Image: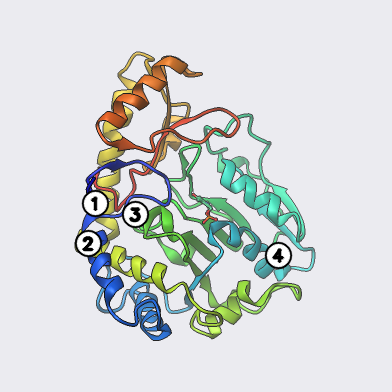
Amino acid sequence: MDSLMQVVNFGPGPAKLPRSVLLELCAGVLSPGLLDNLFPSCEIAQKLGSSFHGLVPLEQALLAVPDNYKVIFVQGGGCGQFSAVPLNLIGLKAGRCADYVVTGSWSAKAAEEAKKFGTVNIVHPKLGSYTKIPDPSTWNLSPDASYVYYCANETVHGVEFDFIPDVKGAVLVCDMSSNFLSKPVDVSKFGVIFAGAQKNVGAAGVTVVIVRDDLLGFALRECPSVLDYKVQAGNNSLYNTPPCFSIYVMGLVLEWIKNNGGAAAMEKLSSTKSRMIYDIIDNSQGFYVCPVEPQNRSKMNIPFRIGNSKGDDALEKRFLDKALELHMISLKGHSTEVTLLSLVRLAPPCSV
Ligand SMILES: *Cc1c(COP(=O)(O)O)cnc(C)c1O
């Protein structure tokens, strides 16, 4: 079988990479010094950093990052940031307390991790199921909290924010792992944005962190240096060996996003693709069931059941078998709490 045979990969992450990126990658890996020499990846990291800053050559296409922010590339994935965020920020105020919005399994995991380093206040009553965003006007923000944390797109549960919460001037921290660069974002509203590359912008191994510079230098004494934003920012992400290969892949994907119209075009694409599937679900007279409230439905990943709201085992198996015959892979979703059959990864750079 041709290893580059076109399959339609719905896997959440590592997610589908554009075929043209895979082809470029094959040639790139052979070029001397790419993986066995630090300096090319330093150059790429610096170029990427300035790309995010909206400078040449990717002007405006990706993400306009204001001058008072640092862009760093670190290892440890999204989960590493679940620790890095409290380690760097929970000490901003004396009480070591942070506000969390928990709308799915990823923000729940982040809140659990933060409890190791301070007090966590969940700003709304615990949700019985992850199918909606609790109304922000009812959030109980704590005046003593060092920051407010949320996950922009819950990859397992299919709940996505289509707004930036108004947190009354508090430091806002956002996990954008699975909708990063899927739409233009006003970075100035955030204290920290982070995103593991493997969901939307590349391969596993590198995580983008965008941090406002007045938040550097507050890490807890016990914060490991590799996780300390100030240390990484001060060393241009080269405090330790950077993940050269992953940074290289991310560079190619960013170029691809730019060449395909940038974040604004990705937003149109995601709206069109997700609308097609939600329309089928909503017009199926209950044959397909998406548990998420319509106003909070993700444009990146769509969880649904087949047959009824709990899922008919035989029908779901048949669906997956038939999909596989058509080279559609990774349609089976996570099985945390309820077995969700997830149709994931509609996000760029997926060509579904
Ligand atoms: C996948 C994912 C993570 C975890 O990322 P790792 O790189 O596996 O640690 C965190 N947050 C969200 C929203 C994710 O989709």
Mark-to-mark CA distance, 3 and 2: 26 Å
Amino acid type at circle 3 is Lys
Q: Which mark is residue 183?
A: 3
**Residue lying at 59% horizontally and 30% vertically, measured from the top left:** 129
User: Is 165 left or right of 98, judged from the image as shown?
Assistant: left
Q: How many marks?
A: 4
Label 4 sits on a secondary structure element that is helix
Residue at (32% x, 17% y) in the render:
284
Of tags 3 and 1, the one toward the viewer is 1
Given contact means CB atoms under 8 Å apart, are the residues at marks 3 and 1 in contact?
Answer: no
**Amino acid type, callout 2:** Leu
**Amino acid marked by disc 4:** Ile
State whether residue 121 is above or below residue 272. below
Image location (x, y in percent) of residue 103: 57, 41
Determine which residue is flagged by label 2: 23
Q: Quadrant of residue 214?
A: bottom right
| Residue 94 drawn at (x, y percent) | 78, 68
Q: Nearer the viewer, mark 1 or mark 4?
A: 1
Q: Residues within 10 Å of mark 1 (few under 14, many from 20)?
A: few
At mark 2, the secondary structure is helix
* 1 or 4: tag closer to the N-terminus: 1
Q: Which residue is mark 4?
A: 90
Mark 1–mark 2 distance (CA, rounded to whole Å): 9 Å
Label 1, label 4: how far apart the Cα atoms are: 45 Å
Q: In this figure, which residue is indicated by the disc labeled 1?
A: 4
Which numbered disc flags the more N-terminal residue, 1 or 2? 1
Quadrant containing the C terminus is top left
Identified by mark 1, the residue type is Leu
